[in-house]
């Protein structure tokens, strides 16, 4: 087994195509196919299912991919620090809940680099996928939140995935609405005032737990609720349907625009304003890249922690 074979494997898994992988790696497809067949023979397993629609990992391939990333990623970090030019492109990925400040920090981080020499990825995605992405090293860093309601369950999930949570900032929840919303002039908003408007929540999958929700009060009964997959759709629903969501109140107007407001959420006996502890997760006992360190620094700078 060689590092080159592992590099080939990771690239095929990402592109889901031998043709695309060969183009990206600047090798011939026969050479690529031969290298993977040799690796499969050495391991005694089949790594990919091949079909006219592309390739997919087998169950054995999926399991081995994690080990391959654990071997190859530290090598990438060594190349990042000590390697010389050439066609090698350093990779860095972040998976995050739908936080505009996490995207803004990514933008500021990327501005430090020659983009032609790097492969960057920012994934606003479901909570379970953040955990999976970082656990399998698809992303180096994940950004998510804990609160009194989900902390025990989330810490258990993170531990089982081999991840460690690092605290960034604590904040109370806010009601995020369009500036033309009937409640936009309120200094604070109670839960009972929201009953006539649709609650907007980010989709977490059919089999997701309340603990994976991005919003507080995820177990409440809502007379109206709409689930969305991305921030742009969420913002459109705020305008078109007077929808609202419960968020951290840390909003990047440069990315979201200034047509929206974060109004403090006023809790009551039945609807507590749980403290949101926002932080980042990384794999336990792994070497953090220089790019990862810079991204965390940009997060802290935006949150006024530096």
Image (tube, rainbow, N blue to C red):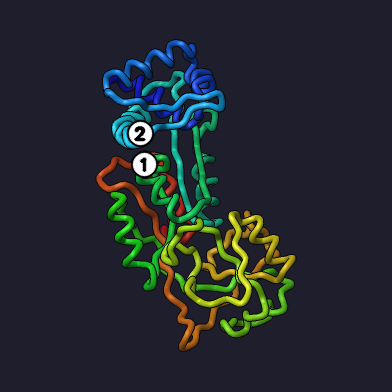
C-alpha separation, residue under disc 2 versus residue under disc 1: 8 Å
Q: Is residue 184 above or below residue 99?
A: below
Does residue 282 appear left or right of residue 16 in this picture? left
Q: Position of residue 23 (x, y in %)?
A: 53, 18
The circle on residue 136 is 1
- Badge 1 crowding class, 10 Å Cα cut-off, few under 14, some 14 to 19, many 20 or more, is many
Residue furthest to the left in view is 285
State the residue at coordinates (39%, 61%): 168
**Spot occupied by residue 143 in the image (x, y as percentages of width and height):** 43, 54
Q: Which of 205 and 10 is in front in this view?
A: 205
Q: Is residue 66 above or below residue 298?
A: above
- Contact between marks 2 and 1 (CB within 8 A): the answer is yes
Left or right of 64? Residue 85 is: right
Q: Where is residue 91 in the image (x, y as percent from the top left)?
A: 44, 34
Location of residue 211 (image quadrant): bottom left
Query: Which callout, 2 or 1, points at the residue further toward the start of the chain?
Result: 2
Badge 2: residue crowd in 10 Å (few <14, some 14–19, many ≥20): many
Is 305 situated left or right of 107 in this image?
left
Which residue does the numbered mark 2 point to in the structure image?
Answer: 65
The N terminus lies in which quarter of the figure? top left
| Label 2: which secondary element | helix
Q: What element carries label 1?
A: loop
């Amino acid at each position: 087994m060689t590092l080159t074979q592992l590099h080939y494997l990771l690239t095929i898994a990402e592109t889901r195509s031998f043709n695309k992988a060969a183009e990206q790696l600047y090798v011939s497809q026969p050479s690529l196919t031969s290298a993977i067949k040799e690796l499969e023979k050495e391991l005694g397993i089949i790594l990919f299912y091949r079909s006219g629609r592309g390739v997919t990992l087998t169950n054995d391939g999926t399991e081995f991919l994690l080990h391959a990333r654990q071997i190859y990623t530290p090598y990438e970090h060594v190349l990042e620090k000590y390697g010389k030019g050439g066609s090698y492109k350093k990779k860095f990925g972040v998976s995050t809940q739908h936080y505009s400040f996490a995207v803004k920090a990514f933008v500021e981080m990327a501005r430090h680099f020659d983009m032609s020499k790097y492969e960057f990825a920012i994934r606003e995605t479901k909570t379970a996928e953040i955990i999976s992405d970082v656990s399998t090293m698809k992303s180096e860093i994940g950004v998510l939140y804990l609160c009194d309601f989900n902390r025990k369950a989330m810490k258990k999930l993170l531990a089982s995935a081999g991840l460690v949570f690092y605290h960034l900032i604590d904040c109370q929840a806010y009601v995020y609405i369009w500036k033309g919303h009937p409640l936009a002039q309120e200094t604070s908003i109670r839960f009972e005032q929201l009953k006539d408007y649709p609650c907007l929540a980010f989709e977490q999958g059919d089999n997701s737990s309340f603990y994976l929700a991005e919003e507080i009060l995820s177990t409440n009964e809502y007379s109206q609720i709409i689930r969305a997959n991305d921030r742009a759709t969420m913002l459109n629903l705020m305008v078109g349907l007077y929808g609202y969501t419960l968020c951290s109140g840390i909003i990047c107007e440069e990315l979201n625009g200034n047509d929206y407001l974060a109004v403090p959420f006023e809790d009551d006996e039945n609807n507590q304003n749980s403290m949101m502890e926002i932080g980042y997760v990384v794999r336990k006992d792994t070497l953090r890249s220089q790019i990862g360190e810079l991204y965390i620094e940009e997060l802290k700078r935006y949150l006024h922690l530096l």
